[in-house]
Image: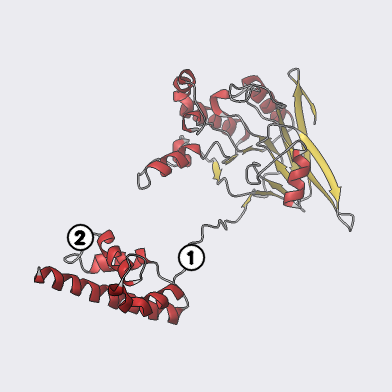
Amino acid sequence: TYTMKQTNRTKIDLVKGYIEKYIELGIKNHCGYSKKFIAKVIAAEHPSLFKDVEAVRTYIRVITQSKGKGDFYEKYSDIASRFALVSNGYNEEITGEPFIIPKQYKKPLIIADLHSIFWEKWAVMAAIEDGVKHGCDSVIINGDFMDFYQFSKFSKDPLTIDKVMDEKEWGVDVLQILQDTFGKVFLKMGNHDIRREKFIKDRFFELDFATYSDYLMFDRSTVDIIHDWQHIHFGKLNIIHGHEYYGGGVHIAYNRLNKTFDNVLSAHSHVSQSVFRQNINGKAYGSWTIGCLCHLHPRYNPMNNWNLGFARAERDASGEFEVINRRFIDKKHYPA
């Protein structure tokens, strides 16, 4: 018993010394050090005393008064208060830069919301034909290329789950077709595209798995994958999937213009719309939403106001642009 108490005393004194050291470093360098970081350092430098990082964190929590009560902990109150002053909060804010479409690509075909094997094949082929006809030099897939139905949080039909097992093969085949046809493909991830990775990370935090890029990789692929939280710059036009801003309502294009305060093209809501406004100095801004290229009446939302559609865009050297928004009606497409 005496040896055990002596060992605990040694561990407490050791950990206390490290905490005081990092308090001084934090004050000196105007930064903070987390309990987990300090625990990792101690565990690595004293493996004979601590079996793992969690064992060290137990002592750190004692000394910083985040565990337990009573007179035993009063002696560490000064350390606890000083440590709190140099502890940094965790910042999950996303601060990534926008993805800039290189200047050599001036006329992209813009498609979105194919939702993998739930795609409306004839509409996708019609959009591709229109892109070829008008000399499009690239394709921007503006989110929800894949669906990952089996990873949805909503109720699922077992028969449907059985059908989506070849989803990866579908995705690779379609990307190859688009790349072979137009030369360059830009694929922005939407809220459905991130389902698979989110599902795996939520349940198996430290498991290694194929990323979205690896999942859809094929020989000779030059597809650029754009993160779901990145917006795209195509000259003076911003392109987002649409899930980045909560809410859509009935007047989707108008609402997204009011949220972005800039020229914006979006998808996600499966509806073709356009709206224009002027600021106080007469500068015009536009918002375009494009229709989907998936089945219009899925089991989870059979009654809706969706429509099939796609868009093309053109820009000049100054970044000025034109959006050509197309809506399908009776398998023919018209200006939206």
- Locate the C terminus by quadrant: top right
Q: Nearer the viewer, residue 216 or 58?
A: 58
Number of dots carrying numbers: 2
- Write the residue at 80% across / 45% down: 286
Q: Nearer the viewer, residue 157 or 269?
A: 157
Three-letter amino acid code at disc 2? Lys
Q: Position of residue 122 (x, y in %)?
A: 65, 19
Horizontal side, residue 49 vs residue 159: left or right: left
Mark 1 packing: few (<14 Cα in 10 Å), some, or many (20+)? few
Q: Nearer the viewer, residue 180 or 309?
A: 309
Separation of residues labelled 2 and 1 (CA atoms): 28 Å
Specify the quadrant of the image occupied by residue 37.
Answer: bottom left
Residue denoted by label 1: 89
- Seen in the picture, residue 200 relative to 278 is either above or below; the reply is above
- Write the residue at 73% across / 18% down: 331
Horizontal side, residue 284 vs residue 329: left or right: right
Specify the quadrant of the image occupied by residue 120.
Answer: top right
- Seen in the picture, residue 38 relative to 330 is either above or below; the reply is below
